[in-house]
Image (cartoon, rainbow, N blue to C red):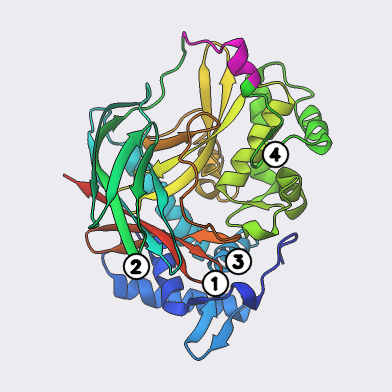
Amino acid sequence: MMRGISFRDHYRNFPEQFIVDMLILKGWAHEADLSLAEAATREALEGWIDIGLGVRHSDQGRMFDPVEVTNFLKWAGVNERDAFWADRYVTTERRLTDDLASLGESETYKVVFRRSFHIREGAERARLRMPLPLASPHLVDLVISPFAEAAGDISLHVSAGRLEARVSALRPGDLTFGAELSFKALRRPEGTTEQLSEKEFELYLRPNEGLIVVTERIKALARSLAERARTSEEALHSFWDFILDEFLIGLIHYDQIDVRQPCDWALEAGLCDCQLASALFVALCRANNIPARLTGGYMLYRPAPANHYWAEAWIDDRGWTPVDFLSWDLSRGGRDAQWRDRCFGRLDPRMTTQAMPLAFTGALGIPMPADFIVVPTARPGGFQIPLFGADGNAVYSDLIEFKT
């Protein structure tokens, strides 16, 4: 049903209740009656199984792949096979966006941000890392108070966009540290007096940087899309329209990507997540001689915060111009004109932690699985954002708590 990506029992390692909880958080974040939400979610899940969603039966019950489930429900929504995506995911995302946009710029965010590393047997001395917000013209009055919730020899070090814990001896179990944060996240003003230096200009045109790989195919596509563009902004909009119209933006299995040409892989698959969609946009910009970068951080939705990636492109006299493919969901795959450009050139407040390639969190400090998935879930007192391997084992879990 979806080209370019395969779903197999190898990935179906998450129990049914986990999947239901994932869907409730994404589709019912504002609902008070969770019993109604659970019943409706289970009914939707049964409907997807009836029309082809994969499931593995085990002695633990039915097991699913969160990547497959997410993409299937969006595929079913786009193809009008099921209304759950439009009625629940899209409606909830729009309300979260509107609620965040309604907050004044005097809003001070007070956040407790923890990361728990799930240490396995055989781990050695390490430097463990977690992201921190980056101070910028759009994130001001930043105060960071780090803490550790672990006994033993552990020291914490704060640098731009990063909190590092240096640990002399790792023991199996959970090791948690974090920071109390206070900041204001501002919307981006129109116009700028900032200029890129020649060195920066070259940096943000590099043809090979992680997921951003400018191949001959990307160059040809960028030329074709921008052929009639009279300005850089028109070129950006042509790249934006292409991605909104030609892709399903859901989740991917990173072990299936061709690491030599990940953007070409996305073109073949017709599928990407927020990170790969943003990387493709950056690659198209760079192929057209427009400086661009991949940016990441956390959405500040109080009912359901989440990690996220977006892109920024440089336009003279305007500066770094953000584009966020969250608009794909908001506009029902680009179909609703009033939402289609909601995240083109403007962003609501968010906690930016990475502006690559100069500011990034860096290596975790423990091995990353070849394939992974991040699945936010609600929990008492906050929101958990764990990273799992495809085998269903958690590598680390972030916990975000908003304080009044």
Residue at (34% x, 43% y) in the render: 300
* Image depth: mark 1 or mark 2 in front: 2
Disc 3/disc 4 C-alpha distance (Å): 22 Å
Q: Write down the residue under mark 1.
A: 391
- Tell me the quadrant of the picture where the C terminus can be found: top left
Q: Write down the residue under mark 3.
A: 72
Residue at (40% x, 46% y) in the render: 129
Indicate which disc, 3 or 4, sits on the residue closer to the N terminus: 3
Label 3 sits on a secondary structure element that is helix
Q: Amino acid at mark 1?
A: Asp
Res 30 quadrant in image: bottom left
Q: Write down the residue under mark 4.
A: 242
Indicate which disc, 1 or 2, sits on the residue closer to the N terminus: 2
Label 3: few (<14), some or many (≥20) within 10 Å?
A: many
Question: Magenta includes 137?
Answer: no
Please state the extent of the stretch shown in magenta in the rendering: 193-202
Indicate which disc, 4 or 2, sits on the residue closer to the N terminus: 2
Disc 4/disc 1 C-alpha distance (Å): 34 Å
Q: Residue furthest bottom?
A: 59
Label 2: few (<14), some or many (≥20) within 10 Å?
A: few
